[in-house]
């Protein structure tokens, strides 16, 4: 059966797909993205290893050892869409060589909600230095094509995989559809990938734990008195049950929601509107119906 490769865009339902939907599909053989052995032998080489050290044959051997007869092999990892370690085109070329007949699933999310969500996710990583949301946003929006915000130019990712696998082998869905009509979202994926439908309702099974304001205050205070590496070492030295208790306590109270100003939203529209418009037109997606801005001067990408 043709494999399915999920190119996990940031904050676009990857946790739900990886830990709720794919495990519940009876004929899905998901390559676990958190398994240390699979991560080390398969995912990390594809998404993080320079060409000189990368071995296609080794990854192919690992993949063959994990394939299950009569099941759809599901390759899924958010790192496959990242621009931090390896260029996207290099990762895509490796996947195309490993699985030339694969189907590609890409879920996108409105940048106006994805970016604040990505900032909150960033706070979960102890060794990343604490910066305020205002500084995080300002530092990245100045030149979004060469900053962390580059990953939100979705049309570039989609066109890359269309060129390698063919447009008919690429499914693009808005994350907002999962929120508004979970059944339609799940049906679209199952029909496209020939996955058996889950026997139970999985639409609300798995979401990332939200962070409360008290966690943010604690994270900021810790980040001012010790380095990120020291904070990570301290965190890892705590017993697992203590770490889980801290997470639970941190999630209590009013959730922390970074706020975008009207000026911020205008900058995001100027940066990503043209990209969204191209994607909407190419894929016949009604992105404006989900709140995406698609009307913008194509030249207005680098925002002062």
Image: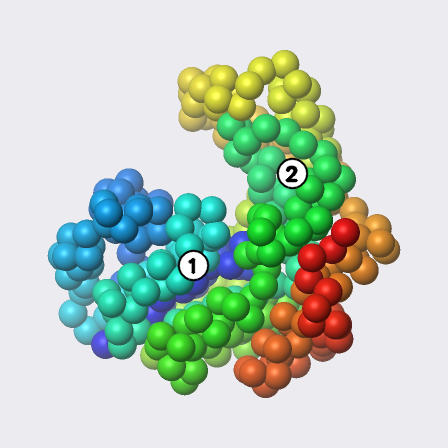
Specify whether 45 is left or right of 189: left
Residue 50 appears in view: yes
At x 23%, y 76%, the residue is 1
Relative vertical location of residue 227 with respect to residue 267 in this rendering, above or below: above
- Counting the numbered discs, the total is 2
Specify whether 118 is left or right of 33: right
Q: Residue furthest top?
A: 225
Specify whether 182 is left or right of 61: right
User: Label 1's element?
Assistant: helix
Relative vertical location of residue 184 with respect to residue 121 in this rendering, above or below: below
What residue is shown with label 2?
A: 211
At x 55%, y 19%, the residue is 227
Percent x, y of residue 263: 84, 54
Specify whether 91 is left or right of 13: left
- Tell me if mark 1 has few (under 14), some (14-19) or many (20+) residues whose alpha carbon lies within 10 angstroms of its own: many
Percent x, y of residue 145: 60, 56
Disc 1 and disc 2 in contact, CB within 8 angstroms:
no
Q: Residue furthest front?
A: 299
Percent x, y of residue 80: 40, 56
User: Label 2's element?
Assistant: loop
- Closer to the N terminus: mark 1 or mark 2? 1
What residue is shown with label 1?
A: 88
Q: Which mark is residue 42?
A: none
In the figure, residue 102 lies in which quadrant?
Answer: bottom left
Please tell me whether mark 1 or mark 2 is closer to you in this view: 1
Percent x, y of residue 113: 69, 56
Residue placed most toward the observer, 34 or 61: 61
Residue 33 appears in view: no
Relative vertical location of residue 207 with respect to residue 166 in this rendering, above or below: above
At x 59%, y 76%, the residue is 279
The image's colouring method is rainbow
- Tell me if mark 2 has few (under 14), some (14-19) or many (20+) residues whose alpha carbon lies within 10 angstroms of its own: many
């Amino acid at each position: 059966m043709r494999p399915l490769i999920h190119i996990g865009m940031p904050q676009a339902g990857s946790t739900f797909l990886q830990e709720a939907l794919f495990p519940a599909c009876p004929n899905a053989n998901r390559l676990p993205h958190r398994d240390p052995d699979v991560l080390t032998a398969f995912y990390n080489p594809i998404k993080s290893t320079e060409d000189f050290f990368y071995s296609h044959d080794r990854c192919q051997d690992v993949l063959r050892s994990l394939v299950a007869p009569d099941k759809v092999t599901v390759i899924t990892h958010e790192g496959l869409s990242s621009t931090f370690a390896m260029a996207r085109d290099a990762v895509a070329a490796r996947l195309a060589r490993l699985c030339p007949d694969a189907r590609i699933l890409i879920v996108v999310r409105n940048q106006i909600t994805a970016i604040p969500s990505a900032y909150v996710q960033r706070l979960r990583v102890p060794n990343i230095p604490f910066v305020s949301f205002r500084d995080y946003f300002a530092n990245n929006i100045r030149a979004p094509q060469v900053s962390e915000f580059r990953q939100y130019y979705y049309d570039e990712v989609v066109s890359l995989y269309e060129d390698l696998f063919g447009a008919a082998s690429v499914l693009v869905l808005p994350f907002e559809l999962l929120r508004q009509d979970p059944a339609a979202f799940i049906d679209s994926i199952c029909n496209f990938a020939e996955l058996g439908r889950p026997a139970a309702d999985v639409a609300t099974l798995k979401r990332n734990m939200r962070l409360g304001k008290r966690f943010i205050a604690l994270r900021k205070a810790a980040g001012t008195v010790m380095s990120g590496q020291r904070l990570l070492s301290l965190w890892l030295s705590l017993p697992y049950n203590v770490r889980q208790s801290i997470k639970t306590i941190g999630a209590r109270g009013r959730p922390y929601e970074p706020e975008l100003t009207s000026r911020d939203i205008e900058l995001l529209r100027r940066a990503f509107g043209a990209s969204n418009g191209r994607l909407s037109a190419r894929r016949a997606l009604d992105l404006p119906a989900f709140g995406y801005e698609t009307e913008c001067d194509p030249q207005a990408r680098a925002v002062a």
